[in-house]
Image: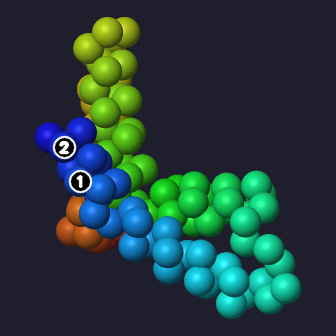
Amino acid sequence: MCGFLLTNWFIFRYPQRRKVNRENYIYENPGVNPDTFGAWIQINIVKSIFNVGIPVNMSFHIAFLLLGIFINWVFLVMNLLLVVNISKTCKFVIRSIT
């Protein structure tokens, strides 16, 4: 399921986010060429993928699932902690407990 959602995010949402971040980069850094390698990495990877919660969470879900299946079942517990990161209700419960 996470693989399906991650694939759909990259097909439908990533191009839009990449274009918006490119325009923001041009607006925030006037006179800087956005086609350089450093700017490309910052726009297409850092701002468009790593600063967004959905692809990072889904990638971690897939990674912990594979680690849990092939390495040790303890990694499957990490998926429960990722649910806290996704759900606002779980975040409020954790804040009230701590």
Q: Is residue 21 left or right of residue 88?
A: right
**Disc 2 crowd, CA 10 A, few/some/many (<14, 14-19, 20+):** few
Estimate the spatial distance between the alpha carbons at disc 2 and disc 1, rounded to whole Å.
6 Å
Disc sitting over residue 4 in the figure: 2
The answer to whether the residues at label 2 and label 1 have Cβ atoms under 8 Å apart is yes
The residue type indicated by label 1 comes to: Asn
The residue type indicated by label 2 comes to: Phe
**Disc 1 crowd, CA 10 A, few/some/many (<14, 14-19, 20+):** few
Occupied quadrant, residue 28: bottom right
Residue at (23% x, 53% y) in the render? 8
Color theme of the render: rainbow
Residue at (28% x, 63% y) in the render? 12
Q: Quadrant of the C terminus?
A: bottom left
Secondary structure found at label 2: helix
Disc sitting over residue 8 in the figure: 1
Of 58 and 31, nearer the camera is 31
Residue 66 pos. (x, y %): 31, 21
Of 86 and 19, nearer the camera is 19
Q: Is residue 94 visible?
A: no
Residue at (59% x, 75% y) in the render? 22
Secondary structure found at label 1: helix
